[in-house]
Image (cartoon, rainbow, N blue to C red):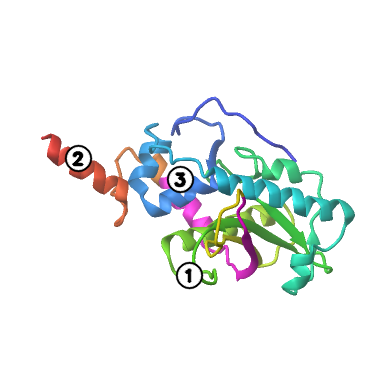
Amino acid sequence: MAYYKKWVKKNFDPESSDPFKLSRSKIDMFLNCPRCFYLDRRLGVSQPPMAPFTLNIAVDYLLKKEFDIHRAKGSRHPLMAKYGVDAIPFANENMDQWRENFVGVQYLHEPTNLLIFGAVDDIWQSPGGKLHVVDYKATSKAGEVELEDTKWHNQYRRQMEVYQWLLRHNGFDVSNLGYFVYVNGRKDKEAFDAKLEFDVKIIPYEGGDAWVEKAIIDAHKCLMSDELPKSGWDCELCKYRKAAAEVEK
């Protein structure tokens, strides 16, 4: 399996015959706002970076270490048993690469010459051999954590479905059933005492990657155009740029 770590060009060049790397997150950017996507990938004007979620990153890192213990043993994590998940962490020599940012699971989409990639958190395998994509999420909210019809949660769903698409195109038998390992920081303790306590929950999600192919083709058409596309209807960054431009006039 070939992996491409670095490409010289960040911006898409319609005249180039080289594959162009397009991440899972950039596909989501295109779906949210074609204009921001075009500015970023075609013209090289990136969005301002978000502040790093360092606590979330720490939780992600520790969860990976914890599940890797069971991956090495070929055993079922107690949390999987608690939620009735009949699977074990998938052991594969490419797991470290699949998790690495800017590398991830990769597939060259030949009709567009776009190298699609995304870094997974985890993959579990059922006794029948099917793979289940797993994504770790961390939050802190009152009450039970559930998947809701919100912008962020819909993005989480698409994220998992792109990973399913990538693994299928790498020849794996992938179930539509994926899992979110959701960690919720508790705020009902009397004192901090230099520690955070969390509730951990597995949320199943039945995905579907039928939309991914069209999204890739549409994103490629957008990149090939010489015209700046319209903004997404609810793009906050475009609204800010427009309002700032009006004031600056």
Residue that badge 3 annotates: 220
Q: Residue furthest top?
A: 8
In front of the other: label 2 or label 3?
A: 2
Q: Identify the element where label 3 is drawn.
A: helix
Per the rendered image, the range of residues in magenta is 195-221
Front: mark 3 or 1: 1
Disc 3: CA contacts within 10 A as few (<14), some (14-19) or many (>=20) = some
**According to the image, label 1 marks what residue?**
148
Left or right of 99? Residue 126 is right
Residue 90's image quarter? bottom right
* Residue 174 % position (x, y): 71, 62
Q: Quadrant of the N terminus?
A: top right
Asked if the residues shown at circle 2 and circle 1 are in contact, with their CB atoms under 8 angstroms apart, the answer is no
Disc on the earlier residue, 2 or 1: 1
Place of residue 85 in the rendered image (x, y in percent of width and height, measured from the top left): 75, 71
Element at badge 2?
A: helix
Residue type pointed to by label 3: His
